[in-house]
Amino acid sequence: MVDSQMVLTGQTIAYTAYCIVIIMLVAWFALKVTGKGNGKGVKPALFYTFVGFLTVLGVSLHLITYNTIPWTHVDLNRSDYTPDKTFSITVRNHQFLLPSEKMIINVNDDVLFDVKSEDLTYGFGLFREDNSMLFQMQVVPGHRNDVIWHFDRPGVYTIRSTEYSGPKGVFMIVKNAVEVVPISAAN
Amino acid sequence: MNFSKTLINGEEGLFRSDTLTPMQKLTLRFVVVGLIYFGFVVIEGMLMRLYEVKPLPFITEPQFFAILTAHPLVGIFGSTYSIVCGAFLFLVPFLMKKPLWSIKMGNWTFLLIAVGTFVFWFAGFVSHYSPLYTLYWPLPADFSQFSVWGGTFFIVGIALVMIGTALFIINIFKTITYTPDGWDKQPSGALLSSALGVTGFINLFRKNKKEHLVPLPVAAVARGSVDMALNTLTILFTGVLILVYMVGSILGFDLKETAIDALLYKNWFWWGLDLIADGLVLIFVAGTWYLLAMLITNKPLFMQNIARAALLVELVVSWTVWSHHLLSDQAQPAILKVVSGEMVTAFELITQGLAFFITLATLWSARPLKMTNPLKFLLGGLLGFALAVPAGIMQADVGLNRILHNTQWVVGPHVHVAILVGLTMTLYSAIYILFPILTNGAKMHSQKLVNVHFWCHLIGGIGMGAFMGMAGLNGMLRRSLYVNGEFNIYMIFAAVSGTLILIGFLAFFYNIVMSVGLKGVLGIFTPARIKTKDLLPAA
């Protein structure tokens, strides 16, 4: 299944390729515009083709991600989904108050994280053991902050606030707070 | 001429500050102060880069976050606003072929931006006031970590900058529409209509098309100034609001989250703030590209009518894109995330892409061109936005934002590349092209140093963005600290890139000082001997 690591790898490849092309294009332009030339202008047809290309590119990016990134549809339609498990978490005085010391999840569970702030705006993110991000959301006081995530493989995750809330916010880390286990192990 | 003579009198003694008009002095003052604040930003950036690798013994943690808070604000207001205001207060009357409406008001803008920036920077330096997320000032206000008095002075500084900005906007619109002494009455309504794009829009629907009374770059300045005005109002209102929280705290009342809905406030503030990033910056930059392309080629702009229309579209787009900052706010309605956050934001790819193409096509039509300093920096600026805008479009996607929001990706390939490479190199291009005009023919001290400046800034800016981006894709958050060196490899390379930018800036600064001389620099700040409203001295 497509997970956030795979999406980021795809993005890295696509954006790196784009950067190489655009840098080479501008370098080529710089060489040509100072080289020999007859002062002839650019045909309007090329301009309109470029406009069409940009339009297709802008629209297709979101269509592609909507249809290939598995969490996008779930995210926009959370009320249509019934999670297998729900964790209610409170944040207060720069601390995460978790429902239990370790939150255990079965592989292939859809889990709802419902996070409430009682003072400031914080963030809530799950991070892998290599520090890469699994997902994150904002935690705004006075509102419901919930995200549903499908866990398709075993792993241990650290919770970290992903929004700046002053110097104290840097230390809002709960190491290895979430563990995803195979169903047999959970039983 | 030997070193000490050049240092004192400038290259070949060509720059003489006593020949400058009040307008030339005003513009040069803006540029000098803007560059000094840019120096602040580069040094602050380097300190933070080094601190991210290994905490420095002479900087405490609260101080690090105070620097983090002041850094973007000094960069945007102290440096960019100064240079932009100075350049446009000169260029708008230059292009309209009439004097600036009020030089006195221009001087007030200069003073308020320069002093206001110092006040908020100093308040942060002394009190370590640092609650902001880049430019976003969060509510509920937190007084457990931050000094109320530090915050009060911080707000006073920002308010001074905003008042200076408001005076700039008034001066620009009055300059476009007023009738100078001894002139025939100017059609102020028609001029305003042309500047804002109303004439161009109505022209689409009528047979006998009216001519444009205002040159295209002036139209860009006017439309960008609309966003600047709205943004100024938003920030001033927010400053007052935060001040209310502070006064409440001083008097012993805690307004907390119950006073104002945090999400509603977030929407309001991001709407106003986005008028800088997605409004006036993009519109001012497009207008500057067009002007530079026309000045470099001495030819009319390619597809001029489309360019005018695109500027108007960009203005409307800038009012409706704010929701891309709230894609990770789960209480934000999905319709706003998709329509404002994704779809309207994608329009920026088109409007900025058009500006990119039109500028290149205008340059192409004048082949062969000489690779002058303004041209090379203009190409650098174009490349910067060509790299940074798509990076921004990618993070303005519901799916991708879930794993990119608040990472170094946002602030690296998008923000730093847009500002350092795109915006700053465009401004450098404008400085290099205006330098002989503003100095009455002073000569640049060293072309080699210009080249050092160009390559160091370009490679350093792109490199820094790239390494920050790689760190972000691997999970490194912005506005955070990793004390166990988790992302050191990326931060070391980003610091090396930052060093290149610092070397480039030092080369540029030294070159400018050697070009005009220390006497010349000081002379810029003395009252003008020539009493005239004209932009340039009589030949």
Image: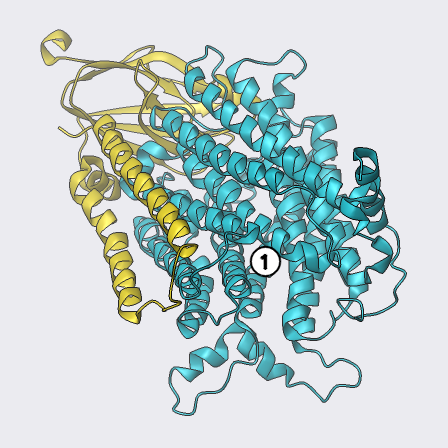
Chain colours: A yellow, B cyan
Q: Position of residue B61 (x, y in %)?
A: 61, 18
Q: Quadrant of the C terminus of chain A?
A: top left
Q: Would residue B267 be visible to someone looking at this image?
A: no
Q: Identify the residue at horizontal 68%, vertical 47% (top origin).
A: B444
Q: Would residue B229 be visible to someone looking at this image?
A: yes
Q: Residue furthest bottom?
A: B208
Q: Where is residue B148, by image quadrant?
A: top right
Is B527 situated left or right of A151 in this image? right
Is A42 situated left or right of B197 in this image? left
Q: Identify the residue at horizontal 30%, vertical 27% (top origin).
A: A113
Looking at this view, is B503 or B262 the one in front? B503
Q: Position of residue B364 (x, y in %)?
A: 40, 62
Looking at this view, is B282 or A108 the one in front? B282
Is B407 situated left or right of B188 in this image? left
Q: Label 1, secondary structure: give it.
A: helix
Q: Position of residue B174 (x, y in %)?
A: 69, 72
Q: Residues within 10 Å of mark 1 (few under 14, many from 20)?
A: many
Looking at this view, is B35 or A174 the one in front? B35
**Disc 1: which chain?**
B
- What amino acid is found at the position of numbered circle 1 in the picture? Met
Q: Where is residue B117, by image quadrant?
A: top right
Q: Identify the residue at horizontal 45%, vertical 16% (top origin).
A: B488
Q: Which residue is mark 1?
A: B228
| Position above or below: B293 against A143 | below
Q: Identify the residue at horizontal 63%, vertical 29% (top origin).
A: B44
